[in-house]
Image (cartoon, rainbow, N blue to C red):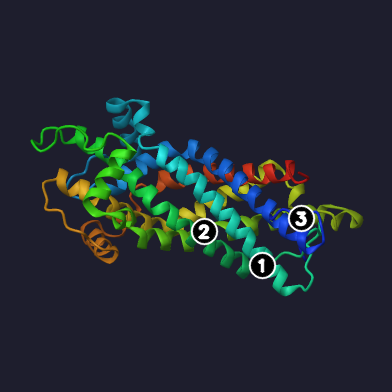
Amino acid sequence: MELAEKSITLSPPKNSNESKNSSKTDQGIKNIIFGSIAGMTGKLVEYPFDTVKTRLQSQPSEYKLFNGPLDCFRQTLKHEGLFGLYRGMSPPMIGAMLENASLFLVYNHIQTMVREFKTPNYNNESQHQAPLSMSVVCLAGGLSGTTASFFLTPIELIKCKLQVQEAFTYKMERNSMITNPRYNGPFDVIKHTLKTHGISGFYRGHSGTIVRETVGTAAWFSTYEFLTRLFILKRIDKSSFNERQNITKDDLSAIELMSSGACAGMAYNLLMFPVDSIKSQMQTDEEIMKITGKDVVKRGFWRVGRELYKSDGISGFYRGCGITVARAAPSSAIIFMTYELLCRHFSTI
């Protein structure tokens, strides 16, 4: 049975070319605003877990600082208080806004382009658009992730450096090389990176980020769309014949939207966690090597991966995976639910 689905993309109100262009602009602005709000909301929920994840990923095999996620939580709260779990949050908050704004903007724009290409005189005023194939959804998601990676790499680099420095300082305080944290905040990281490495320094680890975001976001949107279509199909099967043609994504409950979003978040992280582990090590190599008394050596993506496998095996790629998947579920659920409900509420504006 074909699923009746309303695309996430908001519908323009007019039919003329001028009105369509104006409507696309309005639609894009809404995607940016709603995506930004959804991203900020999700980040507030997930950030403490992200701090723990980054610290577990970045610790070198010869200097095990934490016995696991719970130990990392306890040590962070003991030495840094609640603030320690939110250390370096301002760049990721900006990143969450930019990331989700660009994700939903590009994702929806590509879907509209495909519909316009396939259907002459396409009018997305229609309330009952046939769903696009999952391959198109996957393509749109992947391209949106590629776009977002260029915003995320510098922001995640700043975040990772701030997240790991305090942990290594208090866990290795007997080391004579350790005094106070090297960075006093995001702007200090920016200043140091510019002075030491130039603009290119902000894109350390970009190879990992672009792979993670392209493949992971394709899986993220595809999983969400697949599950929402299943929920729509379930509602169609329970509805009368006259009601079936009117059932769209707008009819799904908040629980159904959140369930789909939660599964999407878990799929993304389970699939791409090894890549993220390599990326995090690349972005914190300078800090970790200096703290542990090693000469700073710039390692590439494949070298980090080989050395991580050699020292820790497959399990090394999944350090902190459990807590990451646990935080991804509520975070992604909140992002999709917030975005969808904002679209519904302001659809006529």
Foreground pick, 82 / 345: 345
Foreground pick, 260 / 291: 291
Q: Is residue 174 above or below residue 2?
A: above
| Disc 3 secondary structure class | loop
* Residue 166 seen by the camera: yes
Q: Is residue 207 above or below residue 257?
A: below
- Which image quadrant is residue 140 in? bottom right
Mark 2 or 3, closer to the camera: 3
Foreground pick, 241 / 150: 150
Q: Which mark identifies residue 217?
A: 2
Q: Position of residue 8 (x, y in %)?
A: 68, 54
- Separation of disc 1 and disc 2 at Cα? 19 Å
Of callouts 2 and 3, which one flags the residue occurring earlier in the amino acid sequence?
3
Q: Position of residue 270 (x, y in %)?
A: 45, 55
- Separation of disc 1 and disc 3 at Cα? 14 Å
Name the residue: 72% across, 43% down: 253
Q: Which residue is mark 3?
A: 12
Name the residue: 24% across, 54% down: 197
Q: Position of residue 104 (x, y in %)?
A: 59, 54
From the viewer's perspective, is 178 left or right of 266?
left
Q: Position of residue 314 (x, y in %)?
A: 31, 59
Of callouts 1 and 3, which one flags the residue occurring earlier in the amino acid sequence?
3
| Disc 2 secondary structure class | helix
- Residue type at mark 2: give it: Thr
- Residue type at mark 3: give it: Pro
Q: Are marks 2 and 3 in contact (CB under 8 Å)?
A: no
Foreground pick, 43 / 36: 36
- Residue type at mark 1: give it: Met
Q: Which residue is mark 1?
A: 113
